[in-house]
Image (tube, rainbow, N blue to C red):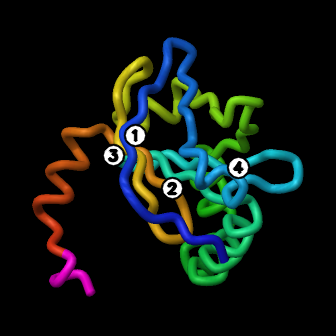
Amino acid sequence: MSYFGGINKRQIDEKNRLPIPKEWRDAIVDSNNNVVAVARTNKIEIYPCRLFDILIAKEVELGLSRGITDIKSKIGSVTEIKELDSKGRIQLSERLLSISGIEGNSSVVVVGAVDHIAVWNPEVFNEYDRSNNIDDIL
């Protein structure tokens, strides 16, 4: 498994392209230079495709009682496969940005979240960071 750690400040440009930190690029992409981007409340999570496949299989298995079709539809509706361009950027859709509450052409905080990358609005991340002490989580 690749490890993603640290915090980086980045700028989403006018075309909604986000530069992925150079030290994470090789680990996040698959052989086709693709990643999976998932919009969540307050953030966008970026996963290597191989890991996302495993996570989805576990979600479906755990959610059998809720209905597999509903789970797959919901996950699919907030997920997009993205390709890194030659400069190591991914283009985030308006839909992903809207769901996550992140604006295009703005500054973001890019956080290494151990097995994936999380992209946050800076104000939301600062509040999250202040209210979640590492000693309380571990």
Between residue 124 and residue 111, name the one nearer to us.
111
- The residue positioned 42% from the left and 46% from the top of the image is 110
Q: CA distance from mark 2 to mark 1?
A: 14 Å
Q: Which residue is mark 2?
A: 117
On the rendered structure, is 42 left or right of 47?
A: left
| Quarter of the rendering occupied by the C terminus | bottom left
Query: What amino acid is labelled 2 in the image?
Result: Ile
Residue 76 in percent (x, y) is at 66, 50
Please identify, in this view, whether the residue under mark 2 or under mark 3 is nearer the observer: 2
Q: Give neighbour class at mark 1: few <14, some 14-19, many 20+ (Cα, 10 Å).
A: many
On the rendered structure, is 3 left or right of 106?
A: right
Does label 1 or label 3 sit earlier along the sequence? 3
Q: Which residue is mark 3?
A: 42
Does label 4 or label 1 sit earlier along the sequence? 4
Q: Is residue 136 above or below residue 23?
A: below
Please identify, in this view, whether the residue under mark 4 or under mark 1 is nearer the observer: 4
Quadrant of the image occupied by residue 100: top left
Q: CA distance from mark 1 to mark 3?
A: 5 Å
Query: Which region is colored magenta?
Result: 134-138
Query: What amino acid is labelled 3 in the image?
Result: Asn
Residue 91 in percent (x, y) is at 62, 28
Label 4: state its secondary structure. strand
Q: CA distance from mark 4 to mark 1?
A: 17 Å
Q: Are marks 1 and 3 in contact (CB under 8 Å)?
A: yes
Query: What amino acid is labelled 1 in the image?
Result: Ser
